[in-house]
Image: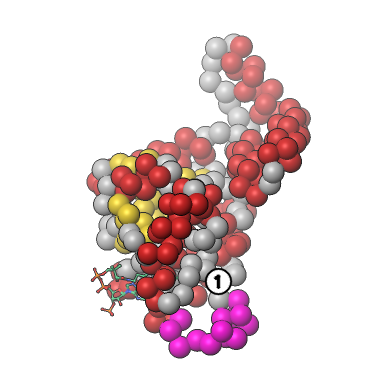
Amino acid sequence: TDFETILVETRGRVGWITLNRPEALNALNSQVMRDVVAAAEEFDADDSIGAIVVTGSERAFAAGADIKEMADKTGLEMVMGDHFGAWGRFAAVRTPVIAAVSGYALGGGCELAMMCDIILAADTAQFGQPEINLAVIPGMGGTQRLIRAVGYYKAAELVLTGRIMKADEAERAGLVSRVVPASDLLDEAHKTAEIIAAKSLPSVYAAKAALDAAMETSLAEGLRFERHVFASLFDTADQKEGMAAFREKRSPDFTHR
Ligand code: HXC
């Protein structure tokens, strides 16, 4: 498939999506949404892909939703165009997604990173939800996922003041999985993706589904879900192989990946 606003590449078992609107610091307009969703769904449907990396440029992961595209819209147009709805399909892919963030991850950019499963940040990364400065609020998950990531008080301060935080603060707050030197970001993202892509795919899907459940359900319900999914993996050949390999002190040779 051809894409207008992103670069797409397959490296081994890892699918790469690079946001490519340098003239707008990768601002997320509707074409970017369509492109990223389509690319992620294509990778997700492909069993030879075991992990996806989403990244931007050195200067910007994404500086937000495209303000120029939104500025003149009416509320009715935002509703009827379901302006940001399709991002839900990106968040719903079963394949783990790593956000490799360098530079600005603001507004929709921060929200896009939070739709991913792992956030690797360059030491140059900056995160924030500055929408309040435009007299709007986050609209792609910023009030919901940020609270779950960093807690109410940190999230409320960021959303209400629009303050931007640097990578080290974001890591301390729990928004970032790991901070690495900017020059290592893409290598680290690829290594992390390859580690995941080498696992048995059914167990990776199950792990992501159970982690997602934790964000949405009560503890009792989440534990029940986890126990059932855990049990279901004992019907895979890969589980037998993984545990046999452990007993035989060798590396496992998984088939479903
Ligand atoms: C459209 C954008 C943009 C954006 C930057 N650009 N961010 N265009 N939408 N979100 C464009 C600029 O207009 C400019 O193009 C070019 O990218 C370079 O940006 P500069 O501002 O010249 O760069 P710099 O001075 O380095 O400042 C970088 C910046 C600033 C601090 C990131 O661009 C900025 O504040 N951007 C907006 C950040 C923001 O408010 N994000 C939240 C958006 S609302 P031209 O051609 O003009 O020179 C949002 C809502 C999400 O995300 C939820 C959905 C409702």
Position of residue 214 measured from the top left corner of the image (x, y, whole percent): 63, 43
Is residue 76 covered in magenta?
yes
- Label 1 sits on a secondary structure element that is loop
Residue bearing the label numbered 1 = 84
In percent of width and height, residue 169 lies at 33, 47
Q: Is residue 78 above or below residue 230?
A: below
The reply to whether the magenta stretch includes residue 41 is no
Quadrant containing the C terminus is top right
Does residue 53 sit above or below 26 in this rendering? above
Q: Is residue 62 visible?
A: no
In the image, what residue occupies the spot 68% across and 46% down? 217
Seen from the viewer's position, the closer of residues 80 and 201 is 80
Q: Which residues are magenta?
A: 70-82
Q: Check the image and name the residue furthest to the top.
A: 248
Which residue does the image show at 39% across and 76% down from the upper left? 134
243 is higher (above) or lower (below) than 193: above
Query: In the rendered view, does 182 fall on the left or right side of 199?
Result: left
Residue 188 placement (x, y as % from top left): 35, 41
Total label count? 1
Position of 112 with respect to 106 (left or right) is right
Give the residue drawn at x 32%, y 68%.
Answer: 25
Please, which colouring scheme is shown? secondary structure
Kindly identify the amino acid type of the residue bearing the numbered disc 1: Phe
Hey, which quadrant is residue 42 in on the image? Answer: bottom right
Quadrant observed for ligand 1 in the rendered image: bottom left
Question: Ligand 1 closer than 8 Å to the CB at disc 1?
Answer: yes
Q: Nearest the camera: 252 or 233?
A: 233
In the rendered image, is residue 245 in sight? yes
Compared with 134, 177 (above or below) is above
Residue in front for this viewpoint, 96 or 81 = 81
Provide residue 200's location: percent of width, then percent of height: 60, 34
- Alpha-carbon neighbours of circle 1 within 10 Å: few (<14), some, or many (≥20)? some
